[in-house]
Amino acid sequence: MDTMRYNWPPRILFNTDGCLAFKYLFRRNPGDVTEMIDQLAGTGVDVLTVLVGINDDLSWRGSPHGELWGECWGADIREVLPAGDDGRPVPGVMPSGDEIRPSDLLQMNLQAMVDDGHDVFGLYLERARAAGMGVYAAFRMNDAHSNMEHRMADGRRSALKIRRPDLLIGSPPPSTPVYNYSEQFSFTWQWDYAQEEVRARFLGLFDEVLTRYGVDGLELDFCRAAPFFKPHQGHRQIETMTGFMRRTRELADEHAGRLGQTVKVACRVPSSFDAVLGQGLDVERWIDEGLVDIATISSTGGWRSQNDVPRAVAAAGASGTLIYVGSGGTYRASPLNGYEVGQPAVRRAIAHNAYAAGAAGVHLFNHDYANHRAMPVAVGDESAMPARDYPPVYQGRMGPFATDRFTRGDLQVIRQLADGQALRSLDRCYQVSPRGAIGDYEPQLPRKLSLTGRGAGDGHLLHLTIEDDIEAGIADGRICKTELRLRLTEYESNLPRIRCEVNDQRIDLYSAAKLRNSEGNEWLVVDNPPLRQGDNAVLVVLEGAEGPNEWVLKMPAVNDGWPSLEQCELVVRCERMEDE
């Protein structure tokens, strides 16, 4: 084997889904699609994981295992864009998102790149290697966009899924569906891995990509998305999926011998090993047996404060598998350091705990989307790259698709996440993760406040881990102060009855400051609660046995006036700045 061509162990794994093909037809310049790679150089991004196509299909034609994404749906670029003398669409003339569906626009850009003779995946590979990065071919192991029956503009199905519904999970749908759409239509358009043909399709894709591109590794993304088997079949299929992973390992090793270079196998999995066992994924065994070189503990949703990174590190003791933490965007937290969405302090807290547990680095999923990063952008925090003259593209819930350019602040956050030691001296927000997805720990919030006279007590504790010596940090000046932040609703008339404790010490909420965001959400902020290294227990309950003051029972199940705890955060302040 030759020596590693990129930094090992990698500090940051950076995933991109290929949708930046959106930018091609503005100037018909393929360099526009991959320019973000130059921005990421020098930030600690050592490996770029690039989806081989979009969602469930490819970025090239002629594969026996898949098709060019969306091609079977027949959107024709010539019907929408004005053509020049050569019959091809005119560069720089693009319809806006109001005039055309975003998926049509994406498909036409991707199709135009291929028709013009560009190898889309190869462009990423070439530019990333020129920047000194390794490149892993990324595969969404069960992409769920095809469940969007009433939003087919976003979730186009492959011709194979339409032709072979017997290979799908089908009906009945899972009890906890992704995106909820599969439940609405009583049908799941995701692959059934109990079918040998499904497993063979993915193994064929792995073989094809390693043969065609000689990439540095494969990334198997199991966060995109459970389920992998029909309802209640996951536990019965654990050996099936472990056998599939063992064959993937063998395939990578075979190509490594042919190429004369290492070929790594990485996986991205949800946050709870016990929960994913029910989906047929024995991740601890994969790690223990060395079936994967890298395991990222992640989520289908946002970054999770409760995760099995420590358990993964323990399982990797003999195999040497590297453990990473990360995900896409963050759940909304209280305003901090000028940010209201995607607060870097939340990512820094989770990464800090992971490094303390023995993680090797951080994985950033879909981080090229502006809405996955910190917002609003501070005045003067301009892009680190020159502006391009792009017209407006689709503006929707995902934000403008053309805005992949990172601000200087964005790049600084990536550098911080690459340096576990530096995180000790930066603001961190330890947040109880709300909501959840298949394979994650059950969310602790939001919840109605329970009554002490009806049994509320230690069983209602919220748990937050802080792997930092708070007392020593305050003593040596590294930590300026700590904060407890609570977002409560319907609480004002019941404040005298709300008991709040942190690590068994009573907290006075009467003197708490109030902090609001631009949407009118309010947090109570208490300075210097009694935090400690390791587990921190927070209790917020309602004293007494009677219902809340001004509580009105409305049938069938709406309790107006009952206090609810929506969010709980512990903030470690290291940076001396004005309060929000």
Image: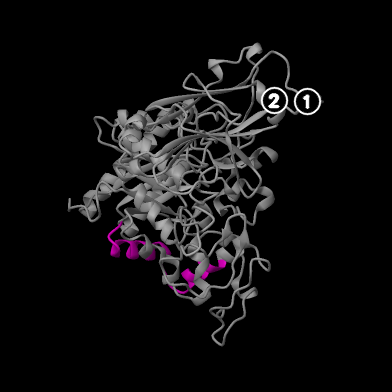
State the residue in front, 70 or 573. 573
Q: Residue at x 38, y 52 (%)?
A: 414
State the residue in front, 214 or 34. 34
Q: Callout 1, which amino acid? A: Glu
Residue 480 image label: none
Q: Is residue 292 above or below residue 410?
A: above
Q: Callout 2, which amino acid? A: Asn
Q: Residue at x 28, y 35 (%)?
A: 290
Q: Position of residue 218 (x, y in %)?
A: 35, 48
Q: CA distance from mark 2 to mark 1?
A: 9 Å
Could you tell which of marks 2 and 1 lies nearer the N-terminus? 2
Boundaries of the magenta span: 108-133
* Residue that numbered label 1 is attached to: 550
Outermost right residue = 555
SS type, badge 2: helix
Outermost front residue = 511
Number of other residues with Cα within 10 Å of mark 2, as a class: few under 14, some 14 to 19, many 20 or more: some
Q: Residue at x 29, y 48 (%)?
A: 10
SS type, badge 1: loop
Outermost left residue = 2
Is residue 255 in view from this perspective? yes
What is the total number of numbered labels drawn onto the structure image? 2
Horizontal arrangement in the rendering, residue 140 relative to residue 351 (left or right): right
Horizontal arrangement in the rendering, residue 368 relative to residue 173 (left or right): left
Q: Is residue 141 above or below residue 61?
A: above
